[in-house]
Image (cartoon, rainbow, N blue to C red):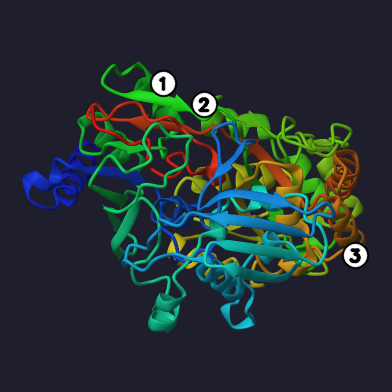
Amino acid sequence: MLRSTCLATALLAAALAAGPPALAQKTVTIVREIDTDRYDPHRSTARSNAEVMYMVGDTLVNLDFDMKTLVPGLAKSWTTSSDGLVYTFKLRDDVTFCSGKKMTAQDVVATYERWQAPETKGLVKWRMGDVDKVVAVDDYTVEYRLKKPFSELLYQMTQYFHTIINIDQVKQLGADYGVKPFDGTGPFCMQSWTPRDETVLLKHANYKWGPSIYKNTTAQVDRIVWKVVPEENTRVTALQSGQADVSQYVPYWALKDLMANKQLSVSKAENYFWTFFIGFKIDRELMTDLRVRKAINLAVDQKAITEAVTFGFAEPASTYLMPSVLDFNGKVDKAIYGESTAEANRLLDEAGWKRGGDGFRYKDGKKLAPVLYGISGFFKEVAEAVQGDLRKVGIDLQVQLFDATVAWGKLATQEFDAFGMSFPYVSAGDALNLYFRSTNTPTPNRMNWKDPETDKLLDEGSTALSADVRAAAYGKVQQKVHDAAVWIPLYHEPLHVVSGSKLKPVRAHGNYGCGLYKGLGIEFK
């Protein structure tokens, strides 16, 4: 084991020693666990896409560290019509893409037209609202016209899906868009991407329009290398030894030691909502029976898993959303969430699944052995713990984990019965619209939850002009999906950013789980 650790450390040191010493002194190395499937704001929901996209691109509106306050981005100001149907954005007139092309209102229009276009196969288009038309009134004024109000539009515009793109590059690269370096307006420019290895960013020399939430509105480092390091031990060693400069991908078992290390600084995001869960594809043969889904929930010990996996840093989940999030329904019935193997066994017996000689359950000659898909890395330990809990009640969970570059494609198929996932959100509406709209199948609504009443309630919430109406609608959706046992909520996790000895402490952000957000808080001592 010692030899293996030493070898991993030596390999990491060699991989991180890129470029001549003069360049290395100006380079910040960020270690992360997994890579993205592509760098395209409209065609990937991966956090590993978002955390780089925020650095190489910009949105019209930005989000403060409190995860509530909106601040100007590419738009220096905006107004909303009284009926909530027209948003008018006044753009900055000093913005350029990394290629040197000047950004104008036409780029904003082209961005949304591309996201909407059927051939793009854009994801989570609900985040745009029900768009009528996006119009360039002049070079630096955009009218964003809706067919119906969207109560969360400005917040959604802080999400990286709304990154303004260079449509000329889209046309030039064709199928290679998202694979070749992205041309954005962010504080950094993408130099290269080597999948499953590293993404290299260079300082955007002309950038001066960073959001006011930062002390610096320009990048303070010349070069950033996002290094994929799947092994937990190696990431920790890299931070401790100074081979890596910053990371939010620190294992819970090492967090106390990292906090005690005077050479390092650790910050925790002030407001952060990120939940781990396992979802069921409810129209698959093994998952159609509500009693089976409830039994699986009752067999899982969230508290024990949270303690074992996160060393008590996370909060065991008995609800799909954090109770402190906007529009949370505190009256949701939690009865089926929390370990009760006796009740789980009773429900499985009632559903006709009887134990065989091997201890597992069978019905009509078929074994209760659902297939779980997930992303390799940190989720492995969670999946194995759930697998162990389910075996106690006779369920033989089959776990199949994939590398991130493959997993997102696999998770868009209909091949599995359950899936492991975690997701960021800042409000109930943000989370519920993402996962429970019928139009979001097969991804990210991987449960195939297609319910007209849910869609109607989500529409009521998203078009509400009153906070009370919005909360009431979203509260009903929360109760409905909880009652249907569509997920196993596992735990709500915190976000910590560890900064190395060469850097000033980096304040953790929480937007879409990207602790470094725009990267403008990264600065040498």
Mark number for residue 256? 1
Q: Which of 341 and 56 is in front in this view?
A: 56
Between disc 1 and disc 3, the foreground one is 3
Q: Is residue 377 left or right of residue 125?
A: left
Pointer 2 or 3: first along the chain = 2
Residue 288, located in which quarter of the rendered image? bottom right
**Residue 417 visible in image:** no
The disc at residue 117 is: none
Location of the N terminus by quadrant is top left
Q: How far apart are marks 2 and 3 (CA)?
A: 41 Å
Residue 329 location, x and y as percent?
84, 36
Q: What element carries label 1?
A: helix
Q: Where is residue 406 in the image (x, y as percent from the top left)?
A: 47, 67
Above/below status of 168 relative to 18: below
Query: Could you tell me which residue is drawn at 81 percent across and 53 percent down?
Result: 462
Residue 180 lies in quadrant: bottom left
Q: Distance between the residues labelled 1 and 2?
A: 10 Å
Residue 163 located left or right of residue 445? left
- Gap in Å between the C-alphas at discs 1 and 3? 47 Å
Residue annotated with mark 2: 311
Q: What residue type is labelled 1?
A: Lys
Three-letter amino acid code at the position of disc 2:
Phe
Q: For label 2, count other residues whose C-alpha is less than 10 Å away and answer few (under 14), some (14-19) or many (20+).
A: some
Q: Which of marks 2 and 3 is in front?
A: 3
Q: For this rendering, which residue is in front, 290 or 437?
A: 437
Q: What element carries label 2?
A: loop
- Bin the neighbour count of mark 1 within 10 Å (Cα to Cα): few under 14, some 14-19, many 20 and up: few
Amino acid type, mark 3: Pro
Local SS, label 3: helix
Q: Mark 3 points at which residue?
A: 452
Q: Residue at x 21, y 36 (%)?
A: 2
